[in-house]
Each structure stands twice: as structure tokens, then as C-alpha cells.
Amino acid sequence: MNIPSNLKYTKDHEWLKIEGNIATVGITDFAQGELGDIVYVDVDTLDDTVEEGDVFGSVEAVKTVSDLFMPLKGEVIEFNEALEEEPELVNSDPYNKGWMIKIDISDSSQIDDLLDAEAYQNLIQG
């Protein structure tokens, strides 16, 4: 199981790479493995400010559709357009080429509520 130590995580299986006031967001290796082959990523919140915990999009796999939850309040400033042609990047490279959105963080105090790699590993191991 790949859980990079330089990222933050949510209980909903999103990861965040925080650089200044910008966070890159995707789903974890564990989440993509549980979903199976991803065939479509839908993000309809580009340029919207989305509250922490609200749905910012969805990911469609062969067997299921799963909502994507906003890890921090912020404005969705970029969508990974490569996923329109190659949604399988979420499966093959979830932490790099398979990122989903970038957000301009509105409330940086919420970062303290995110999980580190060790806490996330404990979460998925039950």
C-alpha cells in the first residue's frame, strides 16, 4: 500500500499536497484499489468555492460511482484535464498524474484536522 509521508489525508480517502495556499487533491491508492477500474472523473465545481465536507465531484468506476469530498474550504482553481482522456491515471498513478483538482485554501486552520500518513494507515487497517 502506497501512502506517501509528505501528504495529508482525509477519512474519506482523499490526499492533499499542500504548497503555500494551494492544495493539490486526489484519491488515495487505497481508494482507487477499492473502486477498481476508473472510467470517468466528473468535477463540476471549477471556479466555485466549496465548503469542507461538501461534494466537489464524482469518480465513476466499472461497478460504482463514488462522490469526492472537499477536504478543506477553498476555491477549485484547476481540474486535471488529462483525466478527461485518461481517467485510468487515477488507478495507475494516483499521487502524481492522477491528481484531480487544485484548490486555493480559504481556511488554513482546517489543515490541522487532516491525517498524516501514519494516522491514515491506521484508519485503513482498522
Image (cartoon, rainbow, N blue to C red):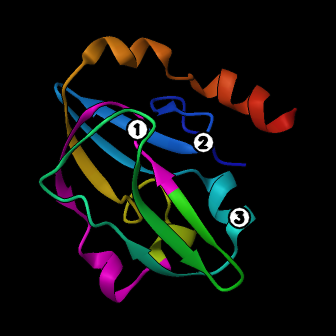
Q: Is residue 126 left or right of residue 74?
A: right
Q: Earlier in the sequence, mark 2 or mark 3?
A: 2
The CA span between labels 2 and 1 is 12 Å
Relative depth, front residue between 32 and 73: 73
Question: Residue 12's mark?
Answer: 2
Crowdedness near tag 2: few (<14), some (14–19) or many (≥20) residues, C-alpha within 10 Å: some
Residue 46 visible from this viewpoint: yes
Q: Position of residue 103 (x, y in %)?
A: 22, 42
The kind of residue on which mark 2 rests is Asp
Q: Indicate whether 95 appears above or below 33.
A: above
Q: Secondary structure at mark 1?
A: strand
> Quadrant of residue 104 in the image?
top left
Q: Indicate whether 86 appears above or below 35.
A: below
Q: Is residue 113 left or right of residue 74?
A: right
Crowdedness near tag 3: few (<14), some (14–19) or many (≥20) residues, C-alpha within 10 Å: some
Location of mark 1 (residue): 16
Location of mark 3 (residue): 33
Question: Residue 32's mark?
Answer: none
Question: Quadrant location of the C terminus?
Answer: top right
The kind of residue on which mark 3 rests is Gly
* Residue range (magenta): 68-88
